[in-house]
Image (tube, rainbow, N blue to C red):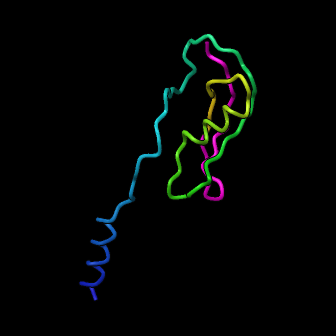
Amino acid sequence: MSRVILLVALALSTSACVTYPRGTLGMASHVMPALESELIAEGVEGRDCDEWLDRRQSEAVEEAIASAPGANALVNATFTFQNFCLVVRGDAVRIP
């Protein structure tokens, strides 16, 4: 019995989460850098729900920015998972 427990413990300790690329961010910072920007819309949202195993934050960010015509960036963004979807919320801005 102890041999089975040892094998299960060994299997669990050597198993790991599988990671895979989910896209890239053009810029990420914990504080807004000193860039000239114009606020286009507050509280925009984008989602990527196509395939829950292939979430990419870039599609969610692009959808959020596209929801605010004239915007080309997202600031004060947060990423969450809801019902197998990657959801991004933030403020859409235009950076010249």
Q: Nearer the viewer, residue 77 or 61?
A: 61
Q: If the image is split into quadrants, where does the N terminus sit? A: bottom left
Residue at the (62%, 53%) spot, across then down: 49
Please give left or right for residue 50 compared with residue 54 in the image.
Answer: right
**Span colored in magenta:** 79-96
Residue at the (72%, 19%) spot, across then down: 39
Residue at the (75%, 28%) spot, across then down: 42
> Is 82 one of the magenta-colored residues?
yes
23 vs 36: above or below: below
92 vs 7: above or below: above
Q: Nearer the viewer, residue 19 or 72?
A: 72
The secondary structure making up most of the magenta span is strand
Residue at the (65%, 14%) spot, across then down: 37
Q: Say which quarter of the image contains residue 14.
A: bottom left
Q: Say which quarter of the image contains residue 18.
A: bottom left
Return the x and y of residue 93 as percentages of the image width and height: 67, 22
Please give left or right for residue 86 compared with residue 6 in the image.
Answer: right
> Is 17 one of the magenta-colored residues?
no
